[in-house]
Image: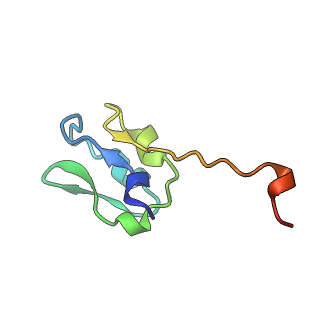
Amino acid sequence: MNSMLLPQIDVTLCNGCGLCVPRCQSKALGMVNGKATLVEPMRCNYDAACEQACPVEAIALPYQIVFAPPPEEQKL
């Protein structure tokens, strides 16, 4: 997975509540030094549960928009 497309955690905003960790079904998040951390980035399934669970909006999931070629240019 492209590192730019991993959840971004702003440790200056993170208050250490830990609500995001149990919401992460892939077990990619953990707590390190009292802050949420992406401890297993390759396990991240990018379901946005962590972002939704964060009460202080310290977690952001960047998205990449990819445009498909027009139907007439697609190969069947």
Residue at 47%, 59% (x, y): give it: 25
**Between residues 34 and 10, which one lies in front from this camera angle?**
10
**Left or right: where 12 falls relative to 58:** left
Residue at image position (50%, 45%) is 63
Residue 41 relative to residue 67: left or right = left
Report x, y in % for residue 69.
Answer: 74, 51
Q: Quadrant of the C terminus?
A: bottom right
Please provide percent x and percent y for residue 67: 66, 47
Specify the farthest residue to the front. Answer: 73
| Extreme-top residue of the structure | 56
Image quadrant holding the N terminus, namely bottom left
At 16% from the left and 49% from the top, the residue drawn is 34
Question: Between 62 and 29, which is closer to the camera in this rendering?
Answer: 62
Name the colour scheme: rainbow
The x and y percentages for residue 3 are 37, 59
Residue 11 drawn above or below residue 13: below
Q: Residue at x 28, y 46 (%)?
A: 18
Total label count?
A: 0
Q: Where is 7 relative to 56, above or below?
A: below
Q: Residue 74's image quarter?
A: bottom right
Q: Is residue 74 above or below residue 7?
A: below
- Give the left or right position of residue 40, taking residue 15 as reference: right
Query: Residue 31: which quarter of the image?
Result: bottom left
**Residue 57 horizontal/vertical position (percent):** 35, 33
- Return the residue nearer the eye: 73 or 50: 73
